[in-house]
Amino acid sequence: MAGRQLAAGELARAAARAAGDRLAPPAPVRLGDVVPAPERVEPHPAADFTLPADAVVRVDPDPAARDVAEQLAALLRPATGYPVPVADTVADPAGGLTLTLSGAGYYATAPTDAPDTAGPATGPDTAGPATAGPTAAGPTAEAGAAGAAALGAEGYRLDVRSDGVRLTAATPAGLFHGVQTLRQLLPATIESPTPVTERWTLPGGTIVDRPRFPYRGAMLDVARHFFAVADVLRVVDHLARYKLNHLHLHLTDDQGWRIAVDARPRLATVGGATEVGGGPGGCYTAADYRRIVRYAVRRHVTVVPEIDLPGHTNAALTAYPELAPEGVAPPPYTGTAVGFSYLDPADERTYAFVADVLREVAAHTPGPYLHIGGDETFKVPPDVYARFVERVQGIVADTGKTVVGWHQIAPAGHAEGRILQWWGTQGNDPVAAEAARRGARLILSPANHAYLDMRYAPDTPIGHDWAGLIDVARAYDWDPGTHLDGVPAEAVLGVEAPLWTEFVTSLAEVEFMLLPRLPAVAELAWSPRRTHDWSAFRDRLAGHGPRWSIAGITFHRAPEIPWPAEPHGAPRLPTQARPDSTPGPTTAQTDTNHAPA
């Protein structure tokens, strides 16, 4: 009798929920409104799910998966005011959110349709339609494991049904990316730091998603202007929100050295004491750097440290003048010229210095990459430069890391696994194409599309314009898979959007230059080429303006985006004077970074 009464009560509650769902308005966000665009979207409007006040996040009893679940719960609590506990079980998913690692107990199936000929020859663009399951639970572990494996290292499947939400992936990174999608499907007020009266409804349906390219990133130049650890962590958050998985930190340049090296302490105390415009500069201690790395790792972002060599080294030479070609300490430099400084490639002390620095940085960096810069060494003869790069590539290999360098290192001898970061403005680069034929992989950062220090428009208050003006449409209007002549899509490791900071002095200005262009680059790096559509993208992007405003994030209200009206408006960028652009003592260029010679 008691069992029949319990069952009847459960049926009554389910009937009440169903009746409420039929009377409720549709979810305020459509399933396809996600940025970057998912690979497959299958809406089920009758299956919207409203988060109840007693919602629980259930997760497989795996420490990495639980960490993602804890981050989801922490995201939901402030705006909803709900307690949102996390439980180490995937049983009884009704009424909550379930995160499943490796597809256990899940029904996902592998995509099966023909390759997308507009995208890479292999990889996510070959995927086909997802198979929708009948409920949030689904049948077998075997089918689930096969489906999760088909999603790859970063893919996920999200099922929203009226009785619950299930997110599955083969890895914690995939779960984390799925959480970012779930976040975007909730009302914009989910970004509020305080409780909001809201109907927390997710649109019903299925999303199956995975990235086109494995490397998706942005670069922050902390050398021209120093940014505190908290600012860097905020940038990590922006990357993670849009499924970007690499943060390239430009740690050293003429104006400042930003990472402490125990074997070379004057790099911090002397080299770190300047910045553009004459400010105090700064330097990350080993503990600071480890904090950045740990924060990024938890958000499935790999930190790529750059020690720019042999040029862009005035700050290092002020600290260790014996490394200068003349053996004389140059004065500190606070302008914005490039191309006038370099370590002496003929002095063996240079290579001892490089080894000291790269060994320590590698020891603090769990990711696989060390970036050696290599750009704008205008005063070093090409043959001497090539020999220098080849020796430094060997030093990087000795640390166990993979070498990354700006595409100027291409003429040097190939090193196993070498990665070139290409920042040109013309799609015809025979030297880069030849390096790819020799086995190099490329990260594409075309300056006239992906350099986020370029102004949006002539009246943008900060930024460069040597590579042209880059509005959101221009940031979106290119294809990484076909951009470089002679470089096949399979040689493209991914995409990165650099932000140089000669004219960027604060977190608000960083955000203003990143947003809304960063999501455009993220979509190129993540989404299948067949989803590329400017009109659809601008409409999806427009919905992110209110989210940024609610979260207190500064952004540029680009006129080409149909932003919805906001009662309080977006955070505004403060005006600033342009920093000093005093030329270097023997400068080859002024007021530029990575401008053509």
Image: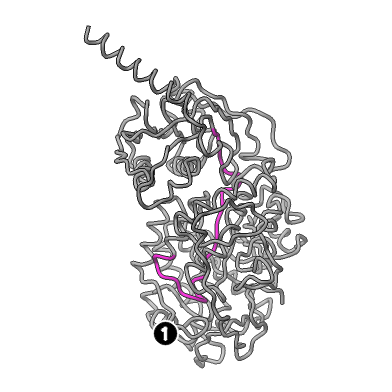
Using the image as rendered, state which of residue 575 and residue 468 is in the foreground: 575
On-image quarter of the C terminus: bottom right
Asked if one can make out residue 438 in the rendered structure from this viewpoint, the answer is: no
Kind of element beneath mark 1 = loop
Q: Residue furthest top?
A: 1
User: Is residue 229 shown in magenta?
Assistant: yes
Q: Is residue 5 left or right of residue 37?
A: left
Residue drawn at x 43%, y 21% as measured from the top left: 18
Residue drawn at x 45%, y 40% as measured from the top left: 175
Q: Residue furthest front?
A: 567
Asked if one can make out residue 81 in the rendered structure from this viewpoint, the answer is: yes
**Spot occupied by residue 413 in the image (x, y as percentages of width and height):** 64, 65
Placement of 373 over or under 316, stated as above or below: above
Magenta-highlighted residues: 207-231
User: Which residue is labeled 1 in the image?
Assistant: 270
Using the image as rendered, state which of residue 186 and residue 246 is in the foreground: 186
Q: Is residue 395 left or right of residue 127?
A: left
Q: Residue furthest left?
A: 2
Placement of 146 over or under 337, stated as above or below: above
Quarter occupied by residue 325? bottom right
User: Is residue 79 shown in magenta?
Assistant: no
**Spot occupied by residue 339 in the image (x, y as percentages of width and height):** 63, 81
**Spot occupied by residue 266 in the image (x, y as percentages of width and height):** 39, 83
The type of colouring in the image is one colour
**Spot occupied by residue 590 in the image (x, y as percentages of width and height):** 65, 83
At label 1, the amino acid type is: Val
Q: Residues within 10 Å of mark 1 (few under 14, many from 20)?
A: many
Placement of 154 over or under 500, stated as above or below: above
On-image quarter of the N terminus: top left
